Image (tube, rainbow, N blue to C red):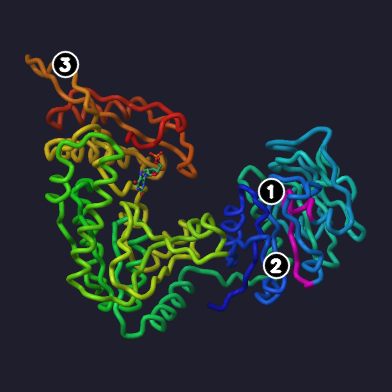
């Protein structure tokens, strides 16, 4: 694929992926590389620019990641962020010291707009808020540099050598809290590096389709489709490329939400691929009879998934390619592309090693989640699939506390649908990042008409989160909660009490099991 490249050199910063995402938002392709990468390899890639990330270390710590001076001799523009800024100063002969006052959080910052970086930053005033997080600071900038920004406690919040095209900021432009931060990155990648903005999902789709065709030729490929965003978009892309040479196996384990299995099937019916839906609900429910321990449930579902997939794959016979919906964050987290990353497990439990295939293809391997969604739209996938919130591989089986029965599955499906409908009616369907119902195994006394009931308690869970590692409960309006509660107890049999989960993660998790 020929498009310009920006390399984000990772020095261990917590925002490395965010920087890359922001650069791509500027329409410029960008990859995160390890700081250990050979400088010759960097030169060979001919990037339009290089960004040094932040990092938790001090440049004076011998064990902290450093970079050879030669990188500054390539004639390529460089932007250093936080630790990256200190590294530029340190490597080129400036001085870095421990702050007398560390800065953390939103910080009023003064900019010199005669700077090339800040002068090219659309709308930037002389003073605005930036996001700081540092305990070292640049006390003296290297020869040839001039200071272009400062704060009350940081004399060199920005500095640059415009002749050699080296730029540095002590703050984090990639974080939303930095006002005009994205515009600063835009100024660097589009202005200073001269990138033309040739990274679009329509362009990606076109070249990815050509690449897949070239690679697969007239051979066959197999994909395990879960109905989640990644595998769905991978299926759509492969379908465009190789159509009937692709077989997608969709294992419906019977723990999908209401109508979900049919939705997935319908979404792919016009894609010209071979779609195999395996209705394996009986197999799964039989396996889980009498099982109530969460880990045991997950394990059994994972194992059974493999068995079902294997049975179906055998019917198809040997294939040359096994396709997977691995995305870029998985690649970065598993070693920055240093090693070949083969995501060997499906989110349910693990793909069988023993399915007979020669090679893996991962057409989304270089895409971030928001790009995967944009690509899905580009390929004509419906919003239902593209905007799907995360859904755990084991499905509703881990949203029914204790033993699973068909009756409980029906109760949960109906209640969960009402919850989702009302969230959508309130126009909040894009607000909480995830929301769902949980059927507890608690029963309590209630009164319905003139009669006593002894029915289930159903919990509603809605969270806001950016990374799903931590989460807040969503502050849904009481009125809305009241409406959902009234509908569920009236419309769903055997539920007489609704509770709203108001726990953050940690200490709770998002799912209940
Ligand atoms: P927890 O419950 O660990 O969930 O806070 C974090 C996120 O992961 C999803 N989740 C899963 N996703 N397979 C998946 O693909 C699983 O087994 C699984 N378990 C939890 C959960 O829905 C939430 O978005």
Identify the residue position indicated by label 1 in the image: 55
Spot occupied by residue 190 in the image (x, y as percentages of width and height): 67, 66
Crowding around mark 2 (Cα neighbors within 10 Å: few <14, some 14 to 19, many 20+) is many
SS label for mark 1: loop
**Nearer to us: label 3 or label 1:** 1
**Mark closest to the chain's N terminus, 3 or 1:** 1
Cα distance, mark 2 to mark 1? 19 Å
Crowding around mark 3 (Cα neighbors within 10 Å: few <14, some 14 to 19, many 20+) is few
Q: In the rendered image, which quarter is residue 188 located in? A: bottom right
Q: Are marks 3 and 2 in contact (CB under 8 Å)?
A: no
Spot occupied by residue 366 in the image (x, y as percentages of width and height): 50, 65
**Mark closest to the chain's N terminus, 3 or 2:** 2
Spot occupied by residue 511 in the image (x, y as percentages of width and height): 35, 37
Q: Nearer the viewer, residue 98 or 316?
A: 316
Q: Nearer the viewer, residue 422 or 344?
A: 344
Look at the numbered disc 3 and say if its residue's Cβ is closer than 8 Å to ligand 1.
Answer: no
Spot occupied by residue 119 in the image (x, y as percentages of width and height): 78, 57
Identify the residue position indicated by label 2 in the image: 49
Ligand 1 appears in which quadrant? top left
Cα distance, mark 3 to mark 2? 66 Å
Q: Which residues are magenta?
A: 74-87
Q: At 47% across and 68% down in the image, what residue appears?
A: 201
Q: At 39% across and 26% down in the image, what residue appears?
A: 502
Does 288 sit above or below residue 307? above
Identify the residue position indicated by label 3 in the image: 445
Q: Nearer the viewer, residue 171 or 176?
A: 171
Q: At 48% across and 72% down in the image, what residue appears?
A: 204
């Amino acid at each position: 694929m020929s498009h310009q490249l920006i390399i984000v050199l990772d020095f261990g910063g917590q925002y490395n992926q965010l920087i890359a995402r922001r650069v791509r938002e500027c329409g410029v392709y960008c990859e995160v590389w390890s700081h250990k990468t050979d400088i010759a390899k960097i030169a060979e890639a001919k990037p339009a620019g290089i960004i040094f990330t932040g990092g938790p270390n001090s440049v004076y710590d011998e064990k902290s990641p450093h970079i050879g001076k030669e990188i500054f001799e390539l004639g390529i523009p460089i932007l250093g962020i936080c630790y990256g800024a200190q590294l530029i100063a340190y490597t080129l002969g400036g001085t870095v010291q421990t702050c007398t006052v560390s800065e953390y959080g939103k910080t009023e910052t003064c900019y010199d707009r005669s700077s090339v970086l800040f002068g090219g930053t659309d709308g930037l005033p002389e003073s605005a808020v930036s996001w700081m997080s540092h305990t070292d600071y640049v006390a003296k900038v290297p020869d040839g540099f001039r200071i272009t920004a400062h704060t009350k406690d940081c004399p060199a919040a920005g500095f640059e050598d415009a002749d050699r095209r080296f730029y540095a900021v002590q703050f984090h432009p990639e974080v939303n809290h930095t006002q005009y931060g994205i515009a600063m990155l835009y100024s660097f990648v589009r202005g200073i590096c001269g990138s033309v903005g040739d990274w679009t999902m329509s362009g990606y789709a076109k070249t990815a389709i050509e690449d897949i065709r070239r690679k697969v030729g007239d051979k066959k490929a197999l994909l395990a489709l879960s109905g989640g965003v990644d595998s769905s978009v991978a299926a759509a892309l492969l379908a465009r490329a190789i159509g009937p040479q692709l077989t997608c196996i969709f294992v419906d384990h019977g723990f999908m939400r209401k109508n979900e299995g049919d939705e997935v099937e319908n979404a792919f019916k016009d894609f010209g691929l071979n779609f195999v839906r395996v209705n394996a609900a009986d197999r799964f429910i039989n396996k889980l009879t009498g099982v109530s321990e969460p880990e045991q449930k997950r394990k059994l579902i994972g194992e059974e998934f493999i068995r079902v997939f294997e049975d179906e794959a055998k019917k198809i016979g040997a294939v040359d390619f096994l396709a997977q919906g691995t995305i870029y964050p998985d690649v970065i987290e598993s070693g920055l592309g240093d090693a070949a990353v083969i995501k060997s497990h499906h989110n349910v439990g693990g793909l069988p090693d023993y399915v007979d295939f020669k090679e893996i293809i991962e057409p989304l391997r270089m895409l971030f989640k928001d790009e995967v969604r944009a690509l899905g739209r580009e390929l004509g996938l419906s919003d239902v699939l593209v905007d799907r919130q995360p859904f755990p591989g084991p499905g509703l089986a881990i949203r029914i506390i204790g033993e699973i029965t068909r009756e409980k599955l029906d109760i949960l499906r109906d209640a969960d649908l009402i919850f989702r409908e009302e969230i959508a009616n309130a126009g909040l369907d894009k607000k909480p990042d995830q929301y769902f119902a949980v059927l507890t195994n608690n029963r309590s006394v209630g009164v319905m008409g003139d009669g006593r009931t002894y029915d289930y308690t159903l919990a509603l869970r809605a969270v806001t989160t950016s990374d799903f590692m931590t989460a807040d409960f969503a502050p849904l309006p009481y009125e809305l909660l009241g409406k959902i509660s009234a509908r569920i107890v009236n419309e769903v049999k055997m539920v007489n009490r609704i509770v709203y989960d108001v726990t953050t993660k940690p200490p709770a998790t998002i799912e209940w099991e």
